Image (cartoon, coloured by chain):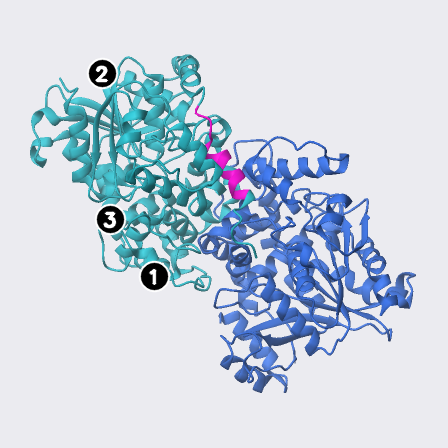
Amino acid sequence: MDTTRTSETIDQDRRRLLGTAAVGIAAAGAASLLPSQKAAASTNDGIRPFTVSFPQEELTELRRRIVATRWPERELVSDEASRRIWSTPATVGPTQGVQLATMQKLMHYWGTEYDWSKCEARLKALPNFVTEIDGLDIHFIHVKSKHQGALPIIITHGWPGSVIELLKIIDPFTNPTAHGGAEADAFDVVIPSMPGYGFSGKPTETGWDSARIARAWIVLMKRLGYDRYVAQGGDWGALITEQMALIAPPELAAIHTNMPGTIPPEIVKALASGGPPPADLGPDEKRAYEQVAFFYKNGLGYANEMALRPQTLYGIVDSPAGLAAWILDHDADSYALIARSFDGEPEGLTRDDILDNITFYWLTHTAISSARLYWEHTQTAKAGFFDAKGITIPVGATANPSEIYTAPKSWTERAFPKLLHYGRTDKGCHFAAWEQPKTFTDEVRATFKTIQT
Amino acid sequence: MNPLIKTLAAVAACTALATAALVLGLCTLSAPAFANPVEDRSIRPFKIQVPQTALDDLRGRIAATRWPDRETVGDQSQGIQLAKIRPLVEYWGRAYDWRTAEAKLNSLPQFMTTIDGVDIYFIHVRSKHPHALPLIMTHGWPGSVLELLKTVGPLTDPTADGGSPEDAFDLVLPSLPGFGFSGKPTETGWNTERIARAWAELMKRLGYTKYVAQGGDWGSPVSNAMGRLAPAGLLGIHVNLPAVVPPEIAAVLATGGPVPAGLTGKERTAFDALSMAAKMGNRSYATMMGTRPQTIGYAINDSPAGLAAWMLGHPGFSGWTYDDSDPEKSPDEVLDDITLYWLTNTATSSGRIYWEYGGGRSPVFADPEKTNEVKLPVAITVFPGEGYRAPETWARRAYPNLIYFHEVDKGGHFAAWEQPELFSAELRAAFRSLRQRN
């Protein structure tokens, strides 16, 4: 077998999913702001308090299914290296997928000791709201700081995350003086659930891509009465935050992203060709190139499936083990982190953190509705996830070493002409706010300090 | 070994031959190809007897299915539509009867033999005609030996439907490693070459000194690999998913470039079909299993609805209605196959053949399939509903010794399943000259 050939299929899918031409996205985003405002104006724009509550029988049924799991046999590879974290250039990942030993530990814990009620209580204790935007109920957590002049911030989660990945930073953001900050570091925090995620409604029509979500977020902040605010995100949250920046409503003062899109056009082209890194790259650029190339080649199976055939994944709605495995197989480094937490070596994420999020997906029945965001993206995307998109408003960017790729400073400066802050952290993977809340808080504070008045 | 296979093995062990064989078989689990002199080479009769508890458990799970909301489009572009899969799964849990399929399989002579450390299940039907040509036929994913059963009559007993005794075949239908009742490899390396070597060994064990091989889907690259290997006795191969796409076309498809100049009408049709399939994402299932078979394996091994949707997501099924409008594509036809995967717990193990092949690649490309190394005679039938219609020009370039090429007017990806009579007639015609020559 000729193993030097790359997969024709993967190349095709990669192009579809990630796009190659960074043209026209800004124009499209700005032009389409109007229809959503119109739609919102014609619907109920009230803000309703939302009470978190799950029926006990759902939890009983979940536990029954966990215990009844029908297991496949073990993978055929040892994959010892897949548990390495903070490695350079990239962790290899589980080469046949999520390992049986990790899954069995996870499922055993989930079915016995794990207690959802603690997470439910945390969610319940927060001010939760729902408001209808563009025909869809949007759930959000809204915590105001006690400090005068707090800067409003809308923070967006990603897949396979949820509002749960952002809970640890609410108090540091709204109550900075209790977390080593000054009053001037205070934020009023808005944390929405994306359409099809968590307690938000599930779209019953197509069209809810990241640009439409960005427009909805702008409506949401306006509805909350904020006339000057900032936005933050990682994963899909980064894409949505970047879309908000491209629309650039006057109220949006700046953004911060922990998965910045910085890849310059000539590098996008080189990556699409599947070739080696161009010779003139600096060490950070070369590493970033290798990280992205690795992810395109080895790490996109899940994204590809959700982008092309989300509905075919009936199994992840019906099987807790299927859902858990699907959620664990996101990127090599966060897999390593999660697998280690079930090996008794937690770093940043605990077993409860991971299962809170998975249980939240299960109880809200959002395995497939959340996956459709990838499908939507494929329908309209002009640029890839990591490509520079032509943002002109002020931006702060954090490059975590074990993110899918570590954005080099050089590319970041080029991508964002008004760069407020570039932070390079010592450790951290994809779920920055969840894994390294302190570093994350420092990074966001450092970014917005410059504009906080 | 999962409990069900254990049970099945125990059934097999009831036969006098098998008891010692099993003991020996366990010693050779990780044996390299044919190097281990203690590998048990016996051929053990095999009967399927699925415990009722497994069927009850399946029904229970189906009844408890947790469904997603419906897709947000009016077509198949987001995957299997809820309104299509749900009635099928509900019928599966309510009225479908596995025992009919089990009886059908048990009415045929079934065997087990250990090759290269893995138990290989196969159906072996000898023709009553003395000079029948031995034929080993290989299924694919998400198929199984079940997709080939309708050809057993026409191929082994041609005179029953007006054929001549000279058209008779002795038929060997193995289950691929990790599929059906065959064992599941516990180590990597079971790629198409290794399967080809195992099949050659199987035919040798059965005492066949002159035989032919056939395959569609994964059966095609397995048959190509047999052709390259050219084991003693193999006279030629027939494939219905031939690897004829030339390298320069493969390169254009990989980059999504413009239509190459100078294509004939049929080449253009083939190019457009391949290009459209890539654009429509028709091979996402292959990419998933080619990169992460274990990850998807948890869901489809635990959820009957998940398994059914995953299997029926194969583009070969896209035109199937699984209603009673077409008896060849009835609900029972697909459910027999899906139930076989469920009961043998092979949702994950079967997906690994994509991983072994590498990254979800399609096996239709001539260069990676090294078709130029297939020196033995090759026959091709092009069925119109296949993912692409191989043009004869490409086929002649790809396979240096093409002895038969025929386009037929009916049938799709699962040709033997959908058009068993036509498929059988094709094999008779394709291999006729090889009989005469030998």
Relative to B125, residue A132 above or below: above
Amino acid type indicated by mark 1 = Glu
Residue drawn at (12%, 19%) of the image: A149
Residue drawn at (51%, 40%) of the image: A11
User: What colour has chain A?
Assistant: cyan
Check if residue A399 falls in the magenta segment. no
Provide residue A393's location: percent of width, then percent of height: 28, 18
In the image, the segment drawn in magenta is A9-22
Cα separation between marks 1 and 2: 49 Å
The residue closer to the viewer here, B42 or A344, is: B42
Mark 1 / mark 2, whichever is N-terminal: 1
Dot 3: what SS?
Answer: loop
Q: To which residue does mark 2 refer? A: A228
Badge 2: residue crowd in 10 Å (few <14, some 14–19, many ≥20): some
Relative to B198, residue A330 above or below: above
The disc numbered 1 marks a residue on which chain? Answer: A
Q: To which residue does mark 1 refer? A: A80
Q: To which residue does mark 3 refer? A: A349
Provide residue A318's location: percent of width, then percent of height: 46, 49
Q: Which mark is residue B165?
A: none
